[in-house]
Image (tube, rainbow, N blue to C red):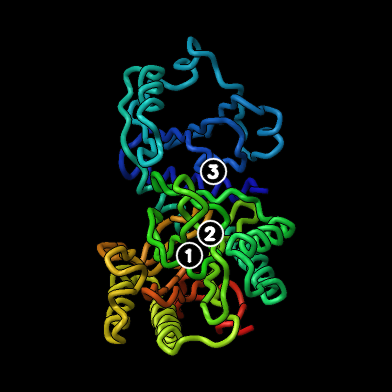
Amino acid sequence: MLTETESQDRILRLQGMLRSKDIQAALFILPIDVYYFSGTRQNAILWIPADGTPMLLVRKSLSRAREESPIADIRPFPSSKEFAAVFSDHQTCIGMTFDAVPIQQHLFYTRALPGRSFVDISMMVRELRSVKSPFELEQLRHSAGKLASVFAEVPHFLKAGMRELDLSAEMEYRLRKAGHEGYIRMRAFNQELFFGLAVSSGGLNGGFFDGPVTGKGLSSASPHGASYEEILPKQPVLMDFVGVFNGYIADMTRTFVIGTLDEELQRAFDVAIDIQEIVRKDMKPGVVGEELFLAAASMAEHAGLGSCFMGMPGQQAKFVGHGVGLELDELPVLAKGFSMLLQANQVIAVEPKFVIPGKGVIGIENTFVVTAEGGLRLSDLPDDIVFL
């Protein structure tokens, strides 16, 4: 549960950023943003003035919001007639996260709060949330540990002849029993994910998902993840799963093989391990995210694997790492065109992967904390391919 000290620290940081931009208040309506500052994911909106006390207005459940949140001023959501009177007339420039606010909602609050102008604070909030507190780092470490413990069980249930779907279901079952919360929140519009991927030959299918591996999925309505395809000997089985515990996300990938592995796939895996290590060493404050991606892409190209790095040829993802926290796609991104400098205590999932047509998908992924000494890994699960 979010402590009062943790909540106040986040709010104070935001208030300083608002004042620096001459914005009088912020209005949050996206549940995960409300949760980040207030500690409750009830149906509510959160008003944070640049100076003064925040206010949480709750539609449902008011009693639970009061139990969960350290915010001092928690009220029932007012009627339309009373809404404007709740807020000061002097707060005229209001920040909203336009990256996650539907136009319909924006229009509603524009009408409900006449005389105000609304400005975009999406990047401000995402940058603030990208730097994790000691409390958050502990939550992320806990999630990574839980996820790793379930990955360690895979050799006990992965068998030749089982479907990708069966393998995924076994993993999902164990994660759920361990306390996985099920919600994998993503901020990007039109992106969806269910627990993760367990793919073998089905991994050679391209798709909509903004990542290196999509999987065939179960239908055209759900074209992502495990399929009905059978897992055969000598085929790499790539398992990329997300752990969500206490709201915080860890991301991890491991590769399994029943029998022996094609030499080209083994070499690609070895290159992925080398890329991960180079990126990890340079995950330091002040480093530009794009530089790490370009270094990774250069290594893949030098190894003769550039055309299949981070996806099928022609369908490659242009990143090698992404921030994680309460959402799977937080800042920073180790990507082409991402010029922001890394900061200490940002948390990044690094995932160099290869999709080699006609042969398979292979790679590695771990979650790291940015430190002055380079990336600090959040779990101790071995990276090696597991041969069964």
| Up/down of 308 relative to 9, above or below | below
Dot 2 falls on a residue whose secondary structure is: loop
Q: Residues within 10 Å of mark 1 (few under 14, many from 20)?
A: many
Labels 3 & 1 near each other (Cβ < 8 A) = no
* Distance in Å between CA atoms under marks 3 and 1: 40 Å
Residues marked 3 and 2 touching at CB (< 8 Å): no
What kind of element bears circle 1?
A: helix
Picture coordinates of residue 73, whole percent (x, y): 60, 30
Point 57% across, 67% down: residue: 230
In the rendering, which numbered label is found on residue 202? Answer: 1
Q: CA distance from mark 2 to mark 1?
A: 6 Å
**Nearer the observer, 343 or 358:** 358
Under mark 2, the amino acid is Ser
- Badge 3 is on which residue? 37
Which quadrant is the C terminus positioned in?
Answer: bottom right
Q: Which residue is mark 2?
A: 227
Mark 2, other Cα within 10 Å: few <14 / some 14–19 / many ≥20 = many
Spatial distance from mark 3 to mark 2, Cα to Cα? 39 Å
